[in-house]
Amino acid sequence: MNDMTEQEHSIKDSRILIVDDEASIRLTFEMFLAREGYGPIVTASTLKEALLAIKEHSFDLIISDIVLEGERGTDLLCKIRESGIECPVVMVTGFPNLDTAAEAVRYGAFDYISKPVNKETLLKFVRQALNHWQLENEKKQLLLENEKFKRYLEAIFSSVSDAIITLDNKLNIVKLNDTAKQWLNVSVTDTLDGINMESYPSEMGKACLQDALQVLSNRQEVCEHQVECRKNDGNIRIISLNAAPLVEDGQDEFSGVVIVARDITLPTPATETNSRNKFHGYVGSSQVMQNVYNLIENVGKVDTAVLVTGESGTGKELAAEALHAESGRRDMPLVKIDCAAMPEELLESELFGHRKGAFTGADKNREGRILLADNGTLFLDEIGDISPRMQLRLLRFLQEKTFTPVGQDTPVHVNVRIIAATNVNFNEKVKDGSFREDLYYRLKVVEIKLPPLRDRKGGIPILVHHFLSLFREQLDRNIHRISDQAMDVLSAYSWPGNVRELRHVIERACVLCEGPTISVEHFPDEILHPLHPVTPQTIPTSTSVTTIATLPPYISEEEEIIDILKRARGNKSKAARMLKIDRSTLYRKMQRIGIAKDIAKPTTRQ
């Protein structure tokens, strides 16, 4: 009863427009409606006044004579519909017939009343029209709310990062979101109604089918079922599956299975828009690395000599491999040689080859690396450490594209692209005369400078993620995360050994980690307590703490190495870290300069 009263109150609280060219009818209708509690009531005597009133106010009902002075009420109906107004219109006619009724309805009238109009008839039609209008509004509102709620659920269902799959009792797919389509290698635009889950034999599909069968069998939830699924790029995605019975709301009727799959793999750090975070073995999305990728891509296509420079561990060999892969020689050999790893005589034989009997021990002919690289690419690593004699032989080869194997008289012509790499400062070596300037410029037609890791700190999270994925698979470890504190430590470290050092640190952490998350405790002491702070903020400011002494300027490389070795008490690993170079590089420098290996070796205390 109360609901009906509220409904009647809502209906009577309605704005009504009366349009008639006779003032007496306007006043009579207004009086009848006002006494019944309807209102506010607005009246108009002409089509123009009616249109002005409609423009200024919104109405719940319009009552209009079908014949106005010099105009027609159907014209008003047309204007109302053209303006998009949907409120009911009741037409009043003095000549009721079928044609009149059909015309009024055709133009959008709710109904019509024949003259003369008494009070009861007027109120009856007003109630019917307003009731109909209220029901229409309520219906539209419900449809809008349902549509809004449906779009809201669809938005959640589609945008959630978890994969959601619903199946019926026969394992037919009822619905799945975009994430599920992606993981199942299904086109986002495909309609999958009625397709059975058994149609997807991928690792993801098999895991979902297994859990769905278990739920259908015992109608119990399957929680935290972790599986490994290989993605399209070949990497492994670790998925945590949850499957539960699907019960229709309010009916307690078992109707299928809902599966929620969550990717618990270490999340890939965000990269810059339109950037690549992987390129021929390189990992990183910073602008400096994008520049390196673009340079390698462009230079690789032209057949010219390239000099790759950068600190140890920055990926100079990767650059050579990428340049070769981007070149037209990609199907021919890429031959590598470490120039600093062998003495001059052996290097000459390795590069140019020799004939049987050319020297003691040459018991057979040997093809050199240059000949092996014919029509391909020759990568000369650590080119800065070769002797003056080898520099001259290499220069002649680059000029003439011919060489003479040791012990042979006739030259050999080859078509080889040269890529050289070094971590030394060539400008200084050219200045002090230890490296030929003409060879330097022959090698440095194009130079690719690889940035040290400390200059691209934003790339550390991406590299950490890459190495974690790599060693999780290699070592068969269930490691999916790294703590925020551990990532902060890695980001703060100076990385003198660059990417190679980071790789070793992550491998060590994966070996030591027994749980799913790498933490600070899995890092070596030199990472947690670096000898050289990265930023001034990390240097203790308290006067009670001894600050770390800075290294003095050195006159020569020999003086620097000898001083650092003494500071490290002969410990080559520690000295290499202080110099921010590899230990192997330190040994090569000591051998080239002539520094004794036992310099500053600690003496045994008596």
Image: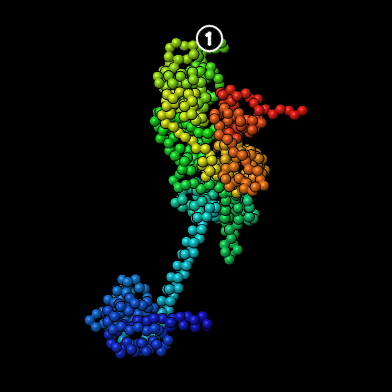
Residue 272: x and y in percent read 47, 47
Residue for point 22% across, 81% down: 70
Residue 248: x and y in percent read 57, 62
> On the image, numbered disc 1 is attached to which residue?
357
Is 330 rendered above or below residue 104? Answer: above
- Kind of residue at badge 1: Gly
Please state if 407 lies on the left or on the right of 586 as rendered.
left
Residue for point 50% across, 50% down: 181
Scheme of image coloration: rainbow
Q: Residues within 10 Å of mark 1 (few under 14, many from 20)?
A: few
Helix, strand or loop at disc 1?
A: loop
Q: Is residue 571 visible?
A: no
Is 566 rendered above or below residue 182? Answer: above
Residue 312: x and y in percent read 54, 33
Residue for point 53% across, 43% down: 457
Is 484 rendered above or below residue 306? Answer: below
Residue for point 54% across, 11% down: 359
Q: Count how many numbered circles sit on residues in the image.
A: 1
Nearest the eye: 185 or 495: 495
Is 376 rendered above or below residue 194? Answer: above
Quarter of the image with the C terminus in it: top right
Residue 304: x and y in percent read 40, 28
Q: Is residue 548 visible?
A: yes
